[in-house]
């Protein structure tokens, strides 16, 4: 297993707000990852730490086995793509492409031209004249064409309509198939990216809640329903509020292995279970209790 990124005991905060709480994550080379979390949960901060745009309070981040302190050139293997890049407003699109392409030794100029035609990006326009969606596409094109060993997309579909979102995902997969590398997609739009992902990292409140393959998650994520006391007798979910309940029937989300012994006990207690999607798991984990009527 070749590790593209190795994060050990990472801690970071802004004032009293903890953003990264002793995080430990491995990103293998040649896989597509989903870095999932609600807006404001620390995805962008983690990306900035990986790219050395922020310095962590404590812990260690290695890129292909080396820290930035050991070898600053490891940053050449990372391309971070986000909506709010600091392009000069009066620069023309062509100049922005020329400037950024020089950072990446395997940049694909031919693909850049094809993508500009596909997404109808006029290279003669200035950056400030582009729509929000076009600015996103400009950044995405640079990321795809960089062919960087580690390419990180931070909310890559902001401002894009449904057609261009689908085009982006199709192009990304085709590019990945042609030039395998580590791709990380940081997003809160789980349903859109679920079928693209091989591995998933879910963060919440500064903690890594789940890091697993999509295949395993689909096998280990459940809705379980039945008598509340009988459910808690098996799963000890006392700290988790039910997703819904009607009469004596309560429904919870659960992430873990249901072995034969547990399933037999559930059958004895008349507790039902069903596998759920990554999107359903994510929504359940981040669900708020809202009371509209007292």
Image: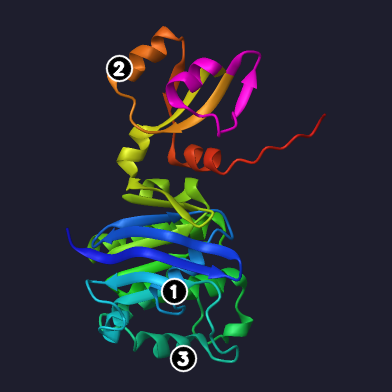
> As drawn, which residue projects farthest toward the right?
294
Q: CA distance from mark 3 to mark 1?
A: 33 Å
Is residue 27 rendered to the left or right of residue 292? left
Marks 3 and 1 close (CB-CB < 8 Å) = no
> As drawn, which residue projects farthest toward the left?
1
Q: Which badge, 3 or 2, comes first in the chain's sequence?
A: 3
- State whether residue 70 is above or below residue 242: below
Q: Which mark is residue 261?
A: 2
Circle 1 Cα neighbour tier, 10 Å, few/some/many (<14 / 14–19 / ≥20): some
Q: CA distance from mark 3 to mark 2?
A: 64 Å
Residue that numbered label 3 is attached to: 95
Q: Residue drawn at (55%, 24%), measured in percent from left and top?
A: 251
- State whether residue 82 is above or below residue 97: above
Circle 2 Cα neighbour tier, 10 Å, few/some/many (<14 / 14–19 / ≥20): few
Q: Position of residue 10 (x, y in %)?
A: 40, 65
Residue that numbered label 1 is attached to: 56
């Amino acid at each position: 297993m070749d590790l593209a990124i190795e994060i050990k005991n990472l801690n970071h905060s802004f004032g009293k707000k903890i953003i990264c709480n002793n995080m430990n994550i491995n990103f293998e080379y040649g896989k597509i990852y989903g870095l999932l979390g609600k807006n404001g949960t620390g995805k962008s901060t983690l990306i900035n730490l990986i790219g050395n745009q922020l310095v962590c309070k404590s812990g260690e981040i290695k890129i292909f086995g080396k820290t930035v302190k050991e070898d600053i050139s490891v940053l050449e293997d990372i391309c971070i793509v986000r909506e709010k890049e600091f392009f000069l407003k009066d620069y023309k699109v062509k100049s922005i492409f020329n400037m950024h392409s020089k950072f990446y030794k395997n940049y694909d100029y031919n693909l850049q031209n094809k993508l500009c035609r596909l997404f109808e990006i006029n290279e003669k326009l200035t950056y400030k004249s582009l729509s929000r969606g076009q600015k996103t596409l400009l950044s995405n094109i640079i990321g795809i064409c960089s062919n960087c060993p580690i390419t990180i997309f931070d909310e890559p579909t902001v401002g894009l309509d449904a057609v261009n979102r689908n085009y982006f995902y199709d192009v990304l997969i085709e590019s990945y198939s042609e030039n395998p590398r580590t791709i990380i997609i940081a997003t809160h739009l789980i349903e859109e990216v679920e079928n693209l992902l091989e591995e998933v990292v879910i963060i919440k409140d500064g903690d890594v809640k789940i890091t697993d393959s999509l295949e395993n998650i689909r096998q280990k994520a459940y809705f379980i329903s039945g008598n509340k006391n009988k459910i808690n007798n098996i799963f000890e979910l006392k700290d988790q509020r039910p997703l819904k309940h009607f009469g004596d029937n309560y429904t919870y989300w659960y992430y873990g292995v249901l072995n034969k012994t547990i399933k037999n006990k559930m059958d004895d207690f008349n507790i039902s279970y069903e596998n759920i999607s990554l999107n359903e798991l994510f929504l359940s984990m981040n669900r708020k209790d809202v009371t509209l009527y007292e």
